[in-house]
């Protein structure tokens, strides 16, 4: 597995999936509350499909 610093530098220049932003707050589909059905807010890197 590549070094984390190298990986972070290369992901920003991704050609296949366009990089949109880093530390973007999104609602998680994985960390969802069972009662309300709303996902917990997490910060992640976002790429276009």
Image (cartoon, helix red, strand yellow):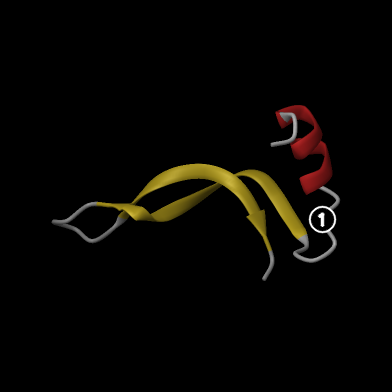
Q: Quadrant of residue 30?
A: bottom left
List x then y, in percent, for residue 46. Answer: 64, 54
Q: Residue at x 41, y 46 (%)?
A: 41
Q: In the rendered view, would you say 23 is above or below 46?
A: above
Side of 44 where 16 appears, left or right: right
Q: Quadrant of residue 47?
A: bottom right
For mark 1, give the secondary structure: loop
Q: Residue at x 82, y 55 (%)?
A: 14
Farthest residue to the bottom: give it: 49
Disc 1: which residue: 14
* Of the pair 47 and 36, the residue shown nearer to us: 47
Quadrant of the snapshot with the N terminus: top right
Q: Residue at x 73, y 56 (%)?
A: 20
Q: Residues within 10 Å of mark 1 (few under 14, many from 20)?
A: few
Q: Residue at x 80, y 66 (%)?
A: 16
Quadrant of the snapshot with the C terminus: bottom right
Side of 47 where 12 appears, left or right: right
List x then y, in percent, for residue 33. Answer: 22, 52
List x then y, in percent, for residue 45. Answer: 63, 47
Q: In the rendered view, would you say 45 is above or below 15?
A: above
List x then y, in percent, for residue 19. Answer: 76, 56
Farthest residue to the left: give it: 35
* Of the pair 18 and 39, the residue shown nearer to us: 18
How many circles with numbers are drawn on the protein?
1
């Amino acid at each position: 597995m590549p070094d984390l610093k190298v990986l972070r530098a290369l992901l920003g220049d991704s050609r296949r999936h366009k990089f949109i932003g880093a530390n973007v707050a999104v609602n998680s589909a994985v960390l969802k509350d069972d009662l309300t059905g709303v996902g917990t807010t997490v910060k992640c890197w976002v790429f276009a499909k």
